[in-house]
């Protein structure tokens, strides 16, 4: 048996890694990967609390988070491809104008 | 005891993969270390008795979503990241570990204050030799009864996402 707080600390550390990657990375794909890492950290605390409360609703929430993450990945990667076509770069420092 | 040892092994793998994601310069290395994080998270879900979530984590996240990422990285031939704007190197070296450790300690303190660290959880809820909590049957019952409407709305979301992806990634015709 593992104390619930261990899961919460792991979840917080994963979320913090995601936030740090989001802030320090310059490649748009890596920034996107950091967002996925944050979503995974949140999912872990959902599942841990579901186990503590003996309620399955947390698992349903995780299911919906995964669906939204998959949809977000599909649309986000399409946007990245469109940006790459017009700018020929993946560096967010070079993508600093809204117009083409 | 065994659960605790397994938890520490996979938690270390998780944190190691997450930190490797930050350290690596090439996006493909970052993507592969994220797969390590997701795989070990799936095993932690199994420790919590969440069989359905663990299976979906491997199939959808580590499988489908990450394959999409790796495809796009290869399609765009993404190279090592170049840094045009330089923030303070000291701020990065100190700030990132401070953020990670600080949030971890904050979670520990809050869960200590609320008494959550005295609750030991995990292990499947076994009844008649079967795990009855978090298996696909139990989740399916809940999903198709109480959460039927959100589930159906999800299908519309997926449809919109597919159409959006097709429209956005399409090459403009001259």
Image (spheres, rainbow, N blue to C red):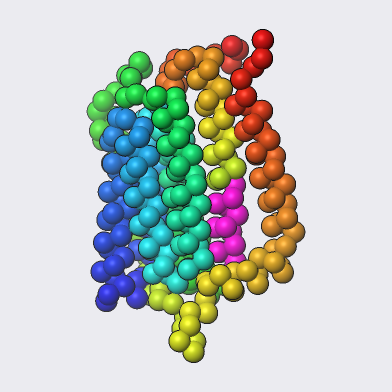
| Magenta range | A56-68
Residue B43 picture location, percent across and down: 38, 63
Q: Is residue A43 above or below residue B119?
A: above
Q: Is residue B100 above or below residue A28?
A: below
Residue B9 picture location, percent across and down: 26, 61
Q: Residue at x 48, y 55 (%)?
A: B59
Label total for image:
0
**Quarter of the image that includes the C terminus of chain B:** top right
Residues B98 and B3: in front is: B3
Asked if residue B156 shows in the view, the reply is yes
Residues A39 and B168: in front is: B168
Residue A29 picture location, percent across and down: 44, 31
| Magenta stretch secondary structure, dominant | helix
**Quarter of the image that includes the N terminus of chain B:** bottom left
Q: Residue at x 65, y 39 (%)?
A: B161
Q: Image check: B155 left or right of B18?
A: right
- The answer to if A65 sits in the magenta stretch is yes
Quarter holding residue B112: bottom left
Q: Image check: A96 left or right of B97?
A: right
Residue A11 picture location, percent across and down: 40, 55
Q: Residue at x 45, y 72 (%)?
A: B49
Residues A89 and B114: in front is: A89
Q: Residue at x 56, y 45 (%)?
A: A70
Quarter holding residue B162: top right
- The answer to if B147 sits in the magenta stretch is no
Asked if residue A10 shows in the view, the reply is no
- Of all residues, the one furthest to the bottom in this rendering is B128
Q: Image check: B67 left or right of A74?
A: left
């Amino acid at each position: 048996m593992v104390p619930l707080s261990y899961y919460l600390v792991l979840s917080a550390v994963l979320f913090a890694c995601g936030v740090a990657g989001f802030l320090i990375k310059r490649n748009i794909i890596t920034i996107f990967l950091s967002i996925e890492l944050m979503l995974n950290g949140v999912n872990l605390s959902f599942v841990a609390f579901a186990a503590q409360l003996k309620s399955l609703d947390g698992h349903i929430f995780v299911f919906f988070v995964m669906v939204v993450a998959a949809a977000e990945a599909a649309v986000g990667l399409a946007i990245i491809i469109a940006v790459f076509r017009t700018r020929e770069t993946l560096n967010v420092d070079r993508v600093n104008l809204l117009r083409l | 005891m065994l659960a605790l040892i397994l938890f520490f092994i996979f938690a270390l793998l998780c944190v190691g993969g997450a930190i490797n994601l930050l350290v690596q310069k090439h996006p493909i290395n970052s993507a592969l270390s994220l797969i390590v994080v997701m795989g070990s998270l799936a095993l932690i879900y199994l420790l919590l008795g969440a069989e359905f979530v663990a299976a979906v984590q491997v199939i959808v996240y580590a499988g489908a979503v990450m394959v999409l990422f790796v495809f796009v990285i290869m399609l765009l031939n993404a190279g090592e990241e170049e840094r045009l704007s330089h923030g303070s190197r000291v701020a990065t070296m100190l700030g990132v570990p401070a953020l990670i450790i600080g949030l971890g300690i904050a979670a520990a303190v809050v869960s200590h204050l609320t008494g959550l660290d005295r609750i030991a959880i995990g292990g499947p809820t076994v009844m008649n030799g079967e795990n009855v909590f978090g298996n696909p049957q139990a989740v399916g019952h809940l999903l198709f009864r109480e959460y039927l409407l959100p589930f159906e709305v999800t299908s519309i979301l997926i449809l919109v996402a597919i159409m959006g992806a097709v429209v956005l990634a399409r090459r403009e015709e001259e």
